[in-house]
Amino acid sequence: MEKFKDLVINDLENLVEELLEKTRTDLGVSVKDFQEVLKKNNEIFDIVDTTLSEFIISQQNTDYIDDWRAKSNTNQSVIMNEHKAMFLYYFMFVNGAFVVFNRIKDVLNKTTIDISDLIPICILGTLARMSDEIGTLLSVGATKAALSAWRSFYDHAVIGMFLMKRDSPDLYKKFADYSHRDVKRKKDFFDKHREELKFPAMEEKRSAAISERTEALKEQYGTDFFKDYNWAKDHLSVRPTFLAIEEEAGMSRYRSFYIWASDYMHPNFNAMANFNNEDKVILDKITEPVMEKESFIDPMQLTLGIFTGFLNLFMHKYSVDHQYATNMKVFNLLYKKMSAEF
């Protein structure tokens, strides 16, 4: 494979030569004497590199961020103008979810609620925020980033639906307590690498509290509590996995889409390379925003379709009885109107 010149700075070799020549003439020494100086003092090249880098950066357009914003706004305007209706109904749905979350939040403000209510409400707020982020990414043509975000959205929705279907106070408590696993893991890896990162040690009191909490949870739930998805094991008939939880949540039909979206979460050659019909790699496609309507359909439909399923359980749990059907009718109708625009 060949190597490439001037990857960052155009005409770099000539610029270096010009800078060195200017330095030589400023010093008033001969070419021969200057060459001897360079041989004895390699730091001069570091100074030259730094000077050139600073110069190149200073010559860049100071309005770059404005240019970038203008380009992004142009892409968004084109996409939104061409596909206005589908984005309208998408964001109306998302806004409706925010309305539900905010109204519950306002009612519960400064009150203490049970963990079995707090978790579904927190998941609702998280899904509202994530669906808004997915829509924003799609609106600028960032479809791969949107699919990556959707996969996390799906994780949260599936867990939320599983918890609400089981509706067990003990299960909610275990799910919340299981979060300590990541606290312990972060501490362990921080302790392992902090010297390399030149970070101070964690406060002994904080470190001890994490260790004590870890042991207390193991004593309460068993030494295997922190194994993957073991918080759910008493509510599953098979080994606890996300796949098993997905089955119990009634969401396994989305598994192929989950795998597809995972291509954009993890390094995957096919997802990066964008093959065309002749199996040729189209490098331009890697960095270009996507403008075609077809690329927006699956992320939008998957997001709101799954959100509808979550909201159906959530509304059934928290709506007053005579309002449940009407509440869901609004979301179902928005989803239907968006889908009709595809």
Image (cartoon, rainbow, N blue to C red):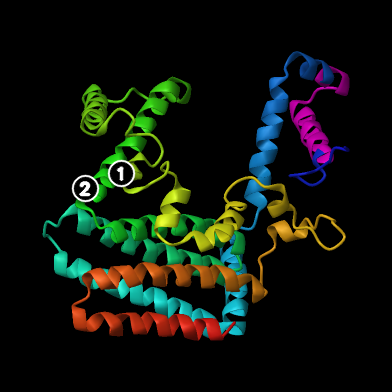
SS assignment at label 2 = helix
Q: Of residues 35 and 278, which is closer to you in this image?
A: 278
**In terms of image quadrants, where is residue 209?**
top left
Question: Could one spot residue 62 in this view of the protein?
Answer: no
Instruction: Return the residue found at the far top.
Output: 40
- As for residue 21 lying within the magenta part, the answer is yes
Q: Of residues 315 and 35, which is closer to you in this image?
A: 315
SS assignment at label 1 = helix
**In terms of image quadrants, where is residue 271?**
bottom right
- As for residue 293 lying within the magenta part, the answer is no
The disc label shown at residue 234, or none: 1
Q: Is residue 141 left or right of residue 323?
A: right
Name the dominant secondary structure of the magenta segment: helix
Q: Is residue 223 left or right of residue 293?
A: left
Residue at 70% x, 39% y: name it: 52
Q: Is residue 194 above or below residue 289?
A: above
The disc label shown at residue 170, or none: 2
Tell which circle, 2 or 1, labels the residue nearer the N-terminal end: 2
State the image coordinates of residue 227 (x, y, percent, origin top left). Answer: 39, 34
Residue type pointed to by label 2: Asp
Q: Are marks 2 and 1 in contact (CB under 8 Å)?
A: yes
* Comparing labels 2 and 1, the label whose residue is closer to the camera: 1
Q: Quadrant of the N terminus?
A: top right
- Residue span colored magenta: 13-34
The disc label shown at residue 263, or none: none
Q: Quadrant of the C terminus?
A: bottom right
Instruction: Report crowding for label 1: few under 14, some 14 to 19, many 20 or more residues within 10 A (C-alpha).
Output: few
Q: Of residues 94 and 303, which is closer to you in this image?
A: 303
Instruction: Report crowding for label 2: few under 14, some 14 to 19, many 20 or more residues within 10 A (C-alpha).
Output: few
